[in-house]
Structure formats: structure tokens, C-alpha cells
Image (cartoon, helix red, strand yellow):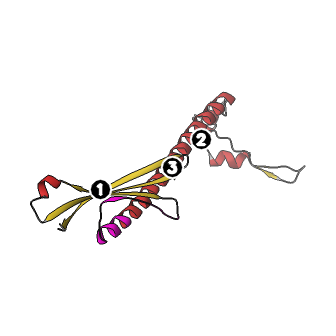
Amino acid sequence: MGEQDNTFWFNPKNALRKMQISRKNKKLSIFFNFRLPILNSERDGFTLLEILVAIAILGIAITIIIQLFSSNLRAIKASGDYVTASIKAEAKMREILDGTLSEGIYGETTDDGYTMDIAISEVLNERTENLNLKLLQVDLTIRWIEGTKQKSMTLSTLKMLEREF
């Protein structure tokens, strides 16, 4: 016990005792005689090597996080393009199905760069030839350019119509 213990923990009596007023500078200088028990008295900081290792680890972690964000942004943009294309294709498919259908292949390009290829053909003719019905298959392929790659998506459906004699 004694003076040795006061060097590791804050002692208010010791702090008041060590408070000195410098007559030369007329300033109050307070000397607290305490140290953190974790730090060694011979080594009161971090070495340059420890700081460089910590900065390197921090740099690697930040780089990984930034790469994750950028890949997520690319995935969000790609999914947005697919959603936009599917909305346009579905609207065109509804327009085709609500109108009069005739067999053939049609093409169309929208103002915003989407190309739609529509193919309408009769299917299962051998099964429906004795019936007063015919079954048409409608295939709609929508294409667009994303960066340097061409993307596409195809929607297909069947529609039953009365057979015309």
C-alpha cells in the first residue's frame, strides 16, 4: 500500500496535494498521478506496426463492404429491367388476346428500345379438328439491350376460339 498503489488508481487526496500554481506562468497546472492498469508503464501507446495492421484490416473490410453494395446495386438495376420488360410484355399480351387473333409472326419496337416478336400458331390441331374449337398458342418474346448484352424474356399462353368454317 502507499505511494505505489496511487500510481495505478485515481486518488483525490493525492490529486489535490499535487495541484500546484506556477508563480512564473500564473497558470494552474494539475498533475494527476494515475495510470490505466491495462497499459504498461514502459509502453503507453501502440506501435507503428500495430497501427498499420489495423489500417490494413480496416481497408480490406471497407473494400469488401463497398463491393457488396455495388453488386447489390447492379442486381437491383437488372431486376428493375426485367420487371419493366415483363410489364410491357404483359400489357402487349393482353392487347393481343383482347383483339382478333390470326396466325402469323409479327414484330414491333417500342419508343424506349424494347423489341417484341409475336408468334401466333394453331396447336393440337389433330385433337380439336372434330370440335367446333381451335387452340392458338401466342408466344411473345421481348428483347432489350443492357450495357453491351442483349437480354430477352418470353411469355407464352394458349387461347381457345370458335372454329370458323
Q: Amino acid at mark 2?
A: Trp
The quarter of the picture where the C terminus appears is: bottom left
Type of the residue with mark 3: Arg
* Residue position marked by numbered label 3 in the rendering: 74
Give the secondary structure at mark 1.
strand
Q: Residue furthest right?
A: 24
The quadrant of the picture occupied by the N terminus is: top right
Task: Tell me the mark number nearer the camera, choosing from 3 and 1.
Answer: 1
Residue 107 at x, y = what percent? 42, 59
| Stretch in magenta | 92-111
Mark 3–mark 1 distance (CA, rounded to whole Å): 28 Å
Indicate whether residue 31 is drawn in magenta.
no
Residue at mark 1: 156
Of callouts 3 and 2, the N-terminal one: 2
Closer to the camera: disc 3 or disc 2? 3
The mark nearer the N terminus, 3 or 1, is 3
Q: Which residue is mark 2?
A: 9
Q: CA distance from mark 1 to mark 2?
A: 79 Å
Q: In this view of the protein, which residue sits in the foreground, 157 or 134?
A: 134
Q: Nearer the viewer, residue 146 or 13?
A: 146
**Type of the residue with mark 1:** Ser
Say which quarter of the image contains residue 138.
bottom left
